[in-house]
Amino acid sequence: MHNLYIVRPTKEWEQKQGADFFVVNNELGTKYFEVKTDTQSKDTGNVALELQIVSDNKKSIGCALKTFPDYLFYWIYPTLEVLYWNPQELSPYIIDWVSEGRKIVEVENKNFFSRTMLIPVEEMLATGVVKKLEVSQQLVDKVLL
């Protein structure tokens, strides 16, 4: 018997907690996923971990510290490389990096700005929590075209 997966976009209350997709398999296992696309990581060699969002002087926790999704997928666009991890398992490393005084940059967006910590991809992988996979060009073309 092969695995069968049903994927649906998340509902508004799930999105507010950081999830993009809800997946159920034929054995009724369930997972939530968040997907991020980074257009600069290929050139910088860093993963951008969003720690805080500031909008209209209101502060909220960024996606790197939200633990609701079971997995975060981080596409290093336009490569075929995707990093993925369980946010809850990465959180202790994030706290260490903040305590060490790692570089945090402010990133401007249309309606808000975020405070984002930059961590080298190799250091992310060295945690053992972050994994790497390579998707096929055919899959990328199918998704983007």
Image (spheres, rainbow, N blue to C red):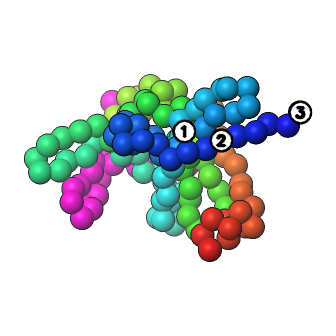
Per the image, label 3 sits on a secondary structure element best described as loop
Q: In whole angstroms, how far apart are the C-alphas of marks 3 and 2?
A: 16 Å
**Which quadrant: the N terminus?**
top right
Q: Amino acid at mark 2?
A: Ile
Per the image, label 1 sits on a secondary structure element best described as strand
Is residue 124 in sight in this rendering?
Answer: no
Determine if the magenta segment contains residue 117: yes
Residue 28's spot in the image, x, y percent?
67, 26
Please tell me the numbered disc located at residue 22.
Answer: 1
* Res. 92 image quadrant: top left
Q: In whole angstroms, how far apart are the C-alphas of marks 2 and 1?
A: 8 Å
- Residue 80's place in the image compared with 33, above or below, is below
Who's the residue at 19% across and 48% down the image?
54
Determine if the magenta segment contains residue 107: yes
* Res. 52 image quadrant: top left
Q: Which residue is mark 3?
A: 1
Please tell me the numbered disc located at residue 66.
Answer: none
Most foreground residue, 14 or 69: 14
Q: Amino acid at mark 3?
A: Met
Residue 105's spot in the image, x, y percent?
29, 53
Q: Amino acid at mark 1?
A: Phe
**Which quadrant: the C terminus?**
bottom right
- For the record, the magenta segment spans 99-121
Question: Between disc 3 and disc 2, whose residue precedes?
Answer: 3
Q: Is residue 58 left or right of residue 16?
A: left
Q: Within 10 angstroms of label 3, few (less than 14), some, or many (20 or more) residues?
A: few
Per the image, label 2 sits on a secondary structure element best described as strand
